[in-house]
Image (spheres, coloured by chain):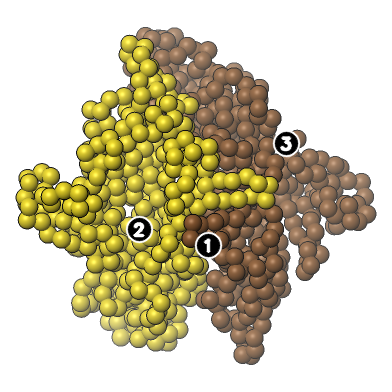
Chain colours: A brown, B yellow
Amino acid sequence: MRQSQLFGKTIKEVLKDETSINAQLLLRGGFVDKLMAGVYTYLPLGLRVLNKIENIIREEINEIGGQEILMPALQNKKDWKITGRWEIDVMMKVKTFFGKEYGLGWTHEEVVTPLAKKYIKSYKDFPFSVYQIQTKFRSEKRAKSGILRGREFSMKDLYSFHTNEEDLDKYYDLAKEAYFKIFERVNIKNKTYLTYASGGDFSKYSHEFQTLSSAGEDTIYICEKCNIAINKEIVENNQPECPQCQNKNLKEEKAIETGNIFKLKTKFTEAFDFKFLDENGKEQLALMGCYGMGPSRLMGTVVELFNDQNGIIWPKSIAPYQVHLVHLGNKEEAIKEAEKIYNALQKEKIEVLYDDRKESAGVKFKDSDLIGVPLRIVVSEKTVSKNSVEIKRRNEEGFEIVGIDKIVGIINCHCEETERA
Amino acid sequence: MRQSQLFGKTIKEVLKDETSINAQLLLRGGFVDKLMAGVYTYLPLGLRVLNKIENIIREEINEIGGQEILMPALQNKKDWKITGRWEIDVMMKVKTFFGKEYGLGWTHEEVVTPLAKKYIKSYKDFPFSVYQIQTKFRSEKRAKSGILRGREFSMKDLYSFHTNEEDLDKYYDLAKEAYFKIFERVNIKNKTYLTYASGGDFSKYSHEFQTLSSAGEDTIYICEKCNIAINKEIVENNQPECPQCQNKNLKEEKAIETGNIFKLKTKFTEAFDFKFLDENGKEQLALMGCYGMGPSRLMGTVVELFNDQNGIIWPKSIAPYQVHLVHLGNKEEAIKEAEKIYNALQKEKIEVLYDDRKESAGVKFKDSDLIGVPLRIVVSEKTVSKNSVEIKRRNEEGFEIVGIDKIVGIINCHCEETERA
């Protein structure tokens, strides 16, 4: 992509109204635009990142047998009355001119449970799991954390269905593993703790995934022996101790909730009378688990974790482009060489953002740091005279001088390397 | 995909409440589920089709320089007050518990125009175009045409921006061509007419794309000499004649509006005071075009056009799978051979739905016809004894007997063939 043509521009000035780092950098970098508090447009750069995160999630959820569907945002009042959740504050309510009233989905148990009931009758059809990556809405009174807490946001919600607890437990553990694979792929695994949370009416515990960050709205208590944590709710209700080793020496930290998983058991299947026929022809209530993760919140979390005073430092796996090709100066030879390299990289299917603008080196370097593409390649009169380019990693100081014929090889090596977090 | 594990099941019975063919077949085939009138869940089969349509649209719009973004569904009342469209009936209104009011987007001029104004200042930044594939909402009083007219539906909306009319005209023609490429790829081009419609305040004409179908809610008047049409609105306001050759002998037909394009010129840029600096440093209003097309409506249209009494006949380009592998009987040899073929096809990256269920031949064939995958491969005791399979095209009578070692080659040929509409 030629930067001269890219829709969305960097903003030089610090934005005084934005208190969160992710909002500050994503807005300034031209990744998102804020329409209203908690409501964002994803610009081309931002949408590329969001799509990459969604695809990573999709791949890992497909891997544990999740089947992708797409449920509507508009919710049926009748079904939410059944579960007693129609009146909950977070639900936005929609009115039409002909007097019909809908809710806007902030979760989808009230859709997926009756849906599953419609198709699934026999124990032979279990277990199964369906998920969607879909836009959710929440009546958030405060929406000041950038894309960490939106009024409209992208969500992956997975629902699994089982005939017995053992089977639910097994899938629940699989989902846990899938979640850590996702965190690993977006490079936040080593800051993310499996965190015990209240299990509600049916289970002792549910689990959150909490990623350490000063931007987090949650407080967690880490057992450094077991490498797990408990959330505030549990600490408030009980003597704070590790649920695995009973260690009472826990470390308090701020964290962002980057996922949660919950054994719903029969909470919703009972409400909707979702029963199946077991091996003996007897009716049984189905058991259920739910597993949430917000791609847009993950994106915000990554920005909170990977930045410096100059801008974002994207992990390779979700960077909008792998290479930021920058040409400096007005000399025709340098421009010609940069164009040649741009074409060569595109031919190699390397994702490249090409800063072909007529701007000073200072402006270009500042923008490049702000946008945070992992690898920067600089082509200037000086480098061309040596038949070379300068290559710099966004997450390291200093640069290398590299022969033009070596560029593709170096990029391919770079892309294959494990991330250095 | 193993059909025994596929979420969503076929429905044998004709659905009495569904008057439209697309709703009837998509619901019965397990492509969609109806949550409420005009509000559908896309099940795994349906989501595959929808995604394929969206990707075809995406490719063709990228080809004419559209940059993909994602604007929010929640709309800012203030901006819709500016254009005087806040009170229009089709807008669903959202209320939050803390007293905030939003609209739900049924189009996005009120978002994209202020957005473009924020970033674009100089004539050098023109022309540019942005689009999204996003969920729209409409307060439709009647919603009885299946996914042809939803209250919640998928929409591609493209917006282009220009410094002068000539440039707008040029892009408008490009968009027209892109639209016909899309119609060609989803196999409805030969039934789709460029249809002259009223141009509103600023242009003599806008254009719709109307696809002939008895399910259509629109009436168009075709000039068979020029292969174009005019819509009802124009006929009602004027002497009906072809705008190109003045032919008055027009043919009346029912049609589905599968796209529309509109030269908005300064209608919205004036409302939002979106000006740029021209070559002489003078402020000028930007010009604008908008281009709509609904992927879910396209999907419904294809079903209306390609079906028989037994079910859907998907064009290859958007079929949920290319091959429906069906095994018959309980003989172990046949099952073993079917499994082998299934694995071999997957290895070849051929999209295959594998009916591995323990059902009768009658049930399996009925389901296969209903689902409408282009190529059916039957493996039975009889075929295996001849080291062969039966291959049948969904859009043809009769079948071929083919040696097992020839299957992959035949499928690859089939997939490369031009569609026979």
Foreground label between 1 and 3: 1
Q: Amino acid at mark 2?
A: Arg
Callout 2 touching callout 3 (CB < 8 Å): no
- Residue at 83 percent across and 53 percent down: it is A233
Give the quarter of the image for residue A122.
bottom right
Q: Which mark is residue B35?
A: none
User: The residue marked by circle 2 belongs to what chain?
Assistant: B
- Asked whether, in this view, residue B226 is left or right of residue A375, the answer is left
Foreground label between 2 and 3: 2
Tag 1 residue:
A100
Label 1 secondary element: loop
User: The residue marked by circle 1 belongs to what chain?
Assistant: A
Foreground label between 2 and 1: 1
Mark closer to the chain start, 1 or 3: 1
- Asked whether, in this view, residue A128 is left or right of residue B21, the answer is right
- Residue at 66 percent across and 43 percent down: it is A149
Q: Are marks 2 and 1 on the same chain?
A: no
In the image, residue B37 sits, relative to residue A14, either above or below, namely: below
Q: Amino acid at mark 1?
A: Lys
Q: Are marks 1 and 3 on the same chain?
A: yes
Residue A401 appears at what percent x and percent y?
50, 17
In the image, residue A325 sits, relative to residue B244, either above or below, namely: above
Few, some or many residues within 10 Å of mark 2 (<14, 14–19, 20+): many
Label 2 secondary element: helix
Tag 3 residue:
A215
Tag 2 residue:
B297
